[in-house]
């Protein structure tokens, strides 16, 4: 199958409302060409997860998502036997003439196997997009479960044997860098760092997502966000917050920023009360830097 | 005119040369990456220098540090290459004409002075009815190395309490709380699929990463012997411990303290760590901890233990930001303050005031009795947090 070129990927993503710069499009292209997982790191809210979502839409495939968390294990990520059903089967067949071997073969057959996201993604007849979200939240030990899958595209199940992939999924891993990922995992992936967007890119994103927004308001929001991100905040706002704010202000038919509006809607942008307090205290300075003439 | 084969050879040579260059700069590049690059060239040759840069970057970069360095190194490599090609003379740059200045090895005297400064003479004797009590109540400003065993025992208890954190994973249990169907069925396989009894499971205790940050500035000089012993004992007891000291800057001691010979540890400390008894820059030191080690060490499985009197001569907003970050990222922040043993003590130093909102457990650590108090305190806090 022909893999789409960098230009085609840029366009495909754009049709789904994702503005990708050249480095993002190149990484997605190479990930598909070389059939290698793409590990995306960057601050929260810059569109890491979104890439997988728009890829699945653009490629017209399902998105299989594995949301990682502390304590996640192979049973929830790869496969699990349906123990309740196995137990019932054994109880129902206690008096049957079936031999132990026959019973064993039945309870460890595909009928009793529950496919979890990783197994599901390689058993699909066509390549799917597999999103392994926030891998840094899973335990370090859990990463080793991925290694066989990501390098050989197969999963070993002791009772059945090795299951080879019917199709190789497009794998996107995201991480917020809550902990360092192992070298073994990194080696198997292509790496992409996504930072907060620059002014031009952020403005393009706003216009693409909210076509009806007032131009002046969009420009002011972008300038404001660029300056807020320069502050030493506990949690800098991402593009997701910019869009939420722009949608909120636009739906209230606001065409420019002023002190009162910013103060009353800052909770959409910042999610930490100390960040909100510090930003409110620096509002005049922020307005000055962003060129907004505040109506007091 | 160059033939295709020649171009191919040149390209392979360039890729290998560039890979070597990056390897020399600390990038972990193997044959797999080189093959990936050639495969992507086969699919499509980059249309421009910038596109080629993006291609190389996507394949060779594996983490953020490399991401930040790559562009500069890429330009440097091709610039040097084109210079060499143009002139046909390899201009060997004298990259390091000046060897890095040799750091003067601090003498063991510096450490000894810090360890024993004006203290032996004023050793406090406590009249008590048993030797055990006497050790227990003696202030650490008069701590003797012979009391190590007792200290080690208490630290073992503290470590045990700190390591008690329930995981989401299960282990087999004798308590009949939750049926373990998986292992019940597995066991039945051995009995001809007859289920004679159920097996049970319970949540596993989680491994906790401990981070110990000790203040060795001038104001902590009185407690210096205790600090060294405390850190050493902790390191011997807890496998996943990361120890740091600070006065005006932060230094990692984990490697040094891992040695089982205490004398050797002291020698290594005196040779490798010149920062004893300086001023106090808690803020800058914690900021440096956050920047250098934060990503790797801080997480919901880490407990940060700070041992300091909280006197800070540095920038308070920096201290506040660093504490806020550490508190947010770590599971718990415990502050042990030797001064808190005094009944009149109030955490009123400016540094301490700024830190208080970001401390989960604040308690004294001025004698063995107070350390036993830490164990009791941790038991209560941890039990209440698991039941709530």
Image (spheres, helix red, strand yellow):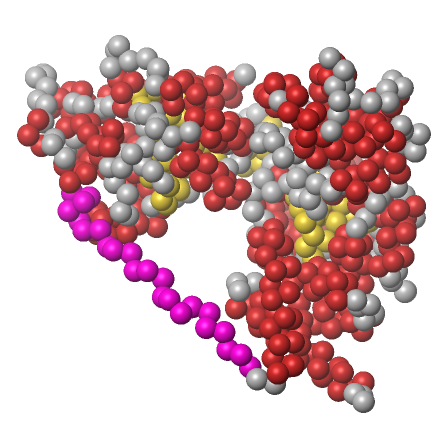
Camera-side residue of B231 and A42:
A42
Residue B216 visible here = no
Q: Residue at x 66, y 21 (%)?
A: A283
The residue range painted magenta reads: B90-112
Quarter of the image where the C terminus of chain A is located: top right
**For residue B70, above or below residue B44:** above
Left or right: where A218 falls relative to A282: right
Asked if the stretch drawn in magenta spans residue B104, the answer is yes
**Image: B307 above or below B36:** above
Looking at the image, the residue that sits furthest to the top is: B344
Q: Nearer the viewer, residue B33 or B81?
A: B81
Q: Residue at x 53, y 36 (%)?
A: B299
Residue A185: image quadrant is bottom right
Q: Position of residue B312 (x, y in %)?
A: 35, 27
For the point 34% across and 19% down, which residue is it? B349
Residue A268 placement (x, y as % from top left): 74, 22
Q: Residue A39 placed where, x, y %?
A: 69, 51
Task: Inspect this view and state whether residue B114 appears.
Answer: yes
- Please identify the dominant SS of the magenta region: loop
Report the residue at 81% width, 71% height from top: B45
């Amino acid at each position: 199958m022909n893999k789409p070129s960098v230009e085609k990927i840029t366009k495909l993503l754009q049709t789904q409302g994702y503005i990708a710069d050249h480095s993002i499009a190149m990484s997605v292209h190479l990930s598909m060409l070389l059939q290698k997982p793409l590990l995306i790191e960057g601050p929260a809210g810059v569109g890491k997860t979104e890439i997988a979502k728009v890829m699945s839409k653009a490629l017209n495939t399902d998105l299989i998502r594995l949301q990682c968390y502390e304590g996640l294990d192979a049973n929830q990520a790869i496969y699990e036997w349906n123990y309740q059903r196995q137990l019932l089967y054994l109880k129902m067949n206690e008096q049957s003439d079936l031999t132990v071997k026959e019973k064993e073969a039945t309870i460890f057959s595909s009928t009793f196997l529950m496919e979890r996201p990783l197994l599901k993604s390689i058993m699909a007849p066509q390549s799917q997009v597999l999103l392994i979200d926030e891998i840094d939240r899973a335990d370090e030990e859990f990463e080793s479960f991925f290694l066989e899958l990501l390098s050989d595209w197969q999963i070993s199940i002791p009772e059945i044997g090795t299951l080879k992939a019917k199709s190789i999924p497009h794998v996107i891993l995201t991480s917020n860098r809550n902990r360092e990922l192992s070298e073994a995992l990194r080696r198997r992936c292509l790496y992409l760092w996504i930072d907060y967007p620059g002014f031009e890119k952020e403005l393009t994103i706003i216009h693409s997502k909210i076509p009806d927004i007032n131009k002046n308001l969009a420009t002011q929001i972008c300038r404001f966000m660029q300056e807020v991100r320069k502050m030493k905040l506990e949690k800098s706002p991402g593009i997701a917050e910019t869009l939420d704010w722009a949608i909120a202000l636009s739906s209230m038919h606001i065409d420019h920023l002023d002190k009162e509006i910013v103060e009353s809607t800052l909770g959409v942008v910042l999610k930490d009360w100390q960040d909100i307090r510090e930003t409110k205290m620096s509002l005049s300075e922020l307005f000055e830097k962003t060129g907004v003439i505040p109506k007091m | 005119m160059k033939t295709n084969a020649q171009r191919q050879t040149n390209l392979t040579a360039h890729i290998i040369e560039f890979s070597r260059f990056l390897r020399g700069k600390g990038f972990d590049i193997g044959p797999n990456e080189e093959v990936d690059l050639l495969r992507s060239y086969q699919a499509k040759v980059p249309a421009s220098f910038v596109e080629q840069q993006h291609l190389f970057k996507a394949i060779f970069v594996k983490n953020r540090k490399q991401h930040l360095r790559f562009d500069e190194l890429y330009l440097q490599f091709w610039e040097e290459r084109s210079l060499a090609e143009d002139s046909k003379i390899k201009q060997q740059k004298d990259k390091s004409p000046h060897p890095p200045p040799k750091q003067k090895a601090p003498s063991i005297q510096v450490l000894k002075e810090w360890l024993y400064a004006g203290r032996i003479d004023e050793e406090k004797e406590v009249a008590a009815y048993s030797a055990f009590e006497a050790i227990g109540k003696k202030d650490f400003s008069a701590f003797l190395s012979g009391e190590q065993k007792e200290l080690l025992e208490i630290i073992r208890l503290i470590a045990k309490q700190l390591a008690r954190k329930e995981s989401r994973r299960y282990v087999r249990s004798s308590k009949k709380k939750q049926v373990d169907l998986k292992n019940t069925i597995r066991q039945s396989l051995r009995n001809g699929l007859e289920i004679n009894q159920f097996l049970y499971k319970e949540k596993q205790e989680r491994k906790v990463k401990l981070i110990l940050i000790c203040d060795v500035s001038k104001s902590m000089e009185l407690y210096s012997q205790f600090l060294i012993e405390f850190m050493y004992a902790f390191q011997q007891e807890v496998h996943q411990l990361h120890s740091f000291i600070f006065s005006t800057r932060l230094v990692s001691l984990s490697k040094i303290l891992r040695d089982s010979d205490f004398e050797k540890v002291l020698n290594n400390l005196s040779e490798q760590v010149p920062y004893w008894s300086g001023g106090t820059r808690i803020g800058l030191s914690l900021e440096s901890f956050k920047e250098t080690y934060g990503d790797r060490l801080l997480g919901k499985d880490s407990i940060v233990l700070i041992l300091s009197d909280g006197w800070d001569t540095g920038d308070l907003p920096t201290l506040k930001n660093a504490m806020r970050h550490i508190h947010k990222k770590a599971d718990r922040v415990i502050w042990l303050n030797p001064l808190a043993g005094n009944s009149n003590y109030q955490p009123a130093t400016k540094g301490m005031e700024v830190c208080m909102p970001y401390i989960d457990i604040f308690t004294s650590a001025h004698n063995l009795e107070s350390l036993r108090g830490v164990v009791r305190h941790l038991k209560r806090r941890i039990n209440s947090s698991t039941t709530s």
